[in-house]
Each structure stands twice: as C-alpha cells, then as structure tokens.
Amino acid sequence: MSKIAFLGTGLLGGAFAEAAARRGDTVTAWNRSPDKVHALAAFGVIAAANPAEAVRNALRVHIVLKDDDIVEEVLAAARAGLSPDAIIIDHTTTLPVRTAARAERLNAEGVKYLHCPVFMGPAAARNAQGTMMAAGPKALFEMVKADLAKMTGRLEYFGERADLAAVNKLFGNAMIIGVAAVMADVLTMAQASSVSAEDAIKLFGLLDLNTMVAGRGANMAKGNFTPSFELAMARKDVRLMLETVGDRPMAALPSVAARMDQLIAAGHGAEDSNVLAIDTVQRR
C-alpha cells in the first residue's frame, strides 16, 4: 500500500485519513490543532509535528483546508519535506482564479499538483461515497486515478484547465445552498399556515425536480425565455408567499421578488420566469 499524507484533519480531512488507514495505507497527518490528529491514532494514523514532517517520503499529499490563504501557507511550510515524486491532491474549496494561478506556479516549479474538490460529508468520505472532481495535467490524473477512485463513489475528470473543478464545486455548492434557502422559506410558510414541517417537505416528492432543473436550465443557458410560466404570474405567486409568512424572516424569496420587480419594470413581465437569467445571456 501507499505512504500518503494528509494536511488538514478537520471533519472531512479526518474522515479521509481514517478511511485511507483502514484501507491499509501508511498515513501521516498534520493539523493546526494537534488534538484532531491524535484522535486518529486509533486507526493507525501517524501524527506529524509540522507539514514538512507529514509529507516526508509521501507519494501522495492530500490537502483538506479552509481556503486559499491557508492552502498557500501550509504548502509553503510543507515544501521542505516534499519529495520530487509526490503528487499534491488539493480537496479544498477555493477561488477558481487563485486555483489556476497556484496550479500554474507549482507545476512550473516542478511540483505536481491536482485540484480535486468533493461533494461529500465525513460519513461519505469514510465509506467512499459521494463525488470527487479533478482538474489538472492528464498525466498526473492518470497516475492517481485508481487511488482517487477508492476514495469516492464517483470520480469526474474535468480536463487540464486547472480551475474547472473549482468552478464546478462552486456551481454545486450554490445549488445546495440555494435549495436549502428555498426549503427554509417553504418551512416558514408551513409554520405560518399551521402545516407541519414534515408534511411540507413531503410535497417535494410529488415534483420531478431533476427534470425541472434539466429543462429550465437548458432554456436559461440558451437564452430561451418563451413563456410557459410568465414572470408576472410568478411574481404574483411570490407575493402570495410573502403575504402568507407575514413578518417572519425569509432566506431567499424577498431577494427573488426584488429581482423580478426589476425585470418587470424593464419590460420582461410577459416572458418566462427563466428570464431571471437574462443578465448572463447579455454578458456573453
């Protein structure tokens, strides 16, 4: 089995390190809070005193950190111990433009770097479920493809453009956060209407949300705003939603209403509610 390192053992990084050790890899890990590494000793994970010690002689170095600044800081601290043959696998959710710049700089310096963010929580990481994306040099991806596949239920390679996995991670997280915000508003309407939260959530089982996303998403991407659900009618429905909740706080719908009002004032009321995406079409 491989000798690998993990830099960052929070909830996700710790789960990855635990799973790797269970698979039989020799795992050394470092975290800014040492207690989080020492908690993994029961699974055979070796605690390192600093990033350079953690990566010494490792064939793969997995990074699971908070943001770009910390990635840069930890990578700089690790460089003294990094083997020329080691491949850095960065799972951190980062800014695309900084990801591209980092990848270009590191690969130019002879440091092998792939960006591989994930859609998974700790439980999924422990059980090799969820999705992992990868972007960077194809040759590097092929070298670690089999090992990465052991960490996830689905592995998607986006190509050599280094920022594409970072961009797609933000796309996915935007959808997750947006859905959570709208569901919170639905639950607020349920509370205001004396409907149980559980019964309100059951409604979504009657809706084919995947088909809605695929169909409406394709039309929005093409700039096709032929009406099937006119913006003016959708705005009326949002008014009813807001009136239903009264003065209770809302997470998403007030902002949607404000944007709808802008578009209606600009003359788009008879177009499909997909016209919410018109600004992206005009900026192409």
Image (tube, rainbow, N blue to C red):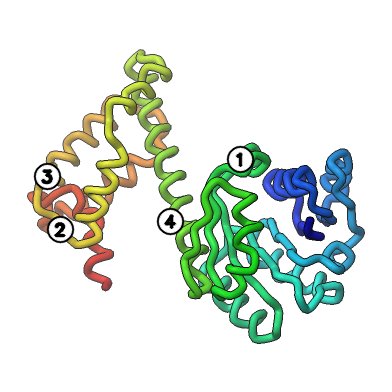
The residue at which mark 4 appears reads as 171
Q: Nearer the viewer, mark 4 or mark 1?
A: 1
Residues at marks 4 and 3 touching, judged by CB atoms closer than 8 Å: no
Q: Quadrant of residue 278?
A: bottom left
Q: Nearer the viewer, mark 2 or mark 3?
A: 2
Single out the residue that lies furthest toward the right: 49
Q: Residue at point 90% right, 57% down?
A: 48
Which circle's residue, 4 or 3, is located before the other in the chain?
4
Mark 3: give few (<14), some (14-19) or many (20+) Cα within 10 Å: some
Q: Helix, strand or loop at disc 3?
A: loop
Residue 91 can be seen in this image: yes
Which circle's residue, 1 or 3, is located before the other in the chain?
1
**C-alpha distance separating marks 2 and 1:** 38 Å
Q: Residue at point 53% right, 68% down?
A: 135
Which circle's residue, 2 or 3, is located before the other in the chain?
2
Is 144 on the left or on the right of 247, as rendered? Answer: right
Three-letter amino acid code of the residue under disc 4: Phe
The residue at which mark 2 appears reads as 224
The residue at which mark 3 appears reads as 230
